[in-house]
Image (tube, grey):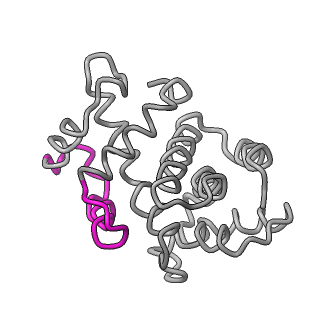
Amino acid sequence: MITRDKALNLLHANMESPNLRKHCYSVEAVMRSLAKHFKEDEEKWGIVGLLHDGDYEKTKDTPEKHTLLMVDWLKKEGEEGEDIISAILSHNFAHTKNNPPKNSLEWSLYCCDELTGLIVAVALVRPDKKLSSVTTESVLKKWKEKAFAGGVKREQIEECVDKLGIPLPDFIDLTLNAMQGISGSLGL
């Protein structure tokens, strides 16, 4: 399995945007928390979260190629773990129409990806613009405002209930706590 250091180097070599990098750090932290919740391999789940959007800058105009480039890079790095490769591919199944999420690793990535963006949006409208002042309740209040962070696919996040067995408020709480744990790295 690729190490976190190698994964971070791979991410930084292919992603320049500080905000996109922060998104990947957020998803990594949440995936580690979800791995702990499911008693799974935190390192593996974290790597998946860190790299899930690693090729986005190079594929944003060709969404059907998103994740495929990252998988090629991983294979060149010697990654042979089918679970890591499958999880990253499943992240973009809406565009590729291949490899839909099929297990807790893949559904966790699918559900938390959009939620990290919503939580950042909630933090940015707080007076101090800090994750520390965001609560699960404040996220749920903004959740109901469909115009707020209108691009966030709430139905994708809501899959946490059926696919992961985690009620939405608990899923928000777990995600928020994970992000608050790395708030310094996120500048929030």
Check the picture and name the quadrant holding the C terminus: top left
Above or below, 173 against 94 in this view is: above
Q: Quadrant of residue 80?
A: bottom right
Front position in the image: 169 or 130: 169
Image coordinates for residue 106, horizontal then vertical, percent: 51, 69
Image coordinates for residue 180, horizontal then vertical, percent: 43, 31
Q: Tag count in the figure?
A: 0
Q: Quadrant of residue 148?
A: top left
Q: Residue at x 67, y 45 (%)?
A: 15
Is 9 magenta? The answer is no
Is 161 magenta? The answer is yes
Front position in the image: 158 or 45: 45
Task: Specify start and end residues of the magenta stretch as a single range.
Answer: 145-168
Q: Residue at x 54, y 49 (%)?
A: 32
Above or below, 34 against 99 in this view is: above
Question: Can residue 9 be spotted in the picture?
Answer: yes
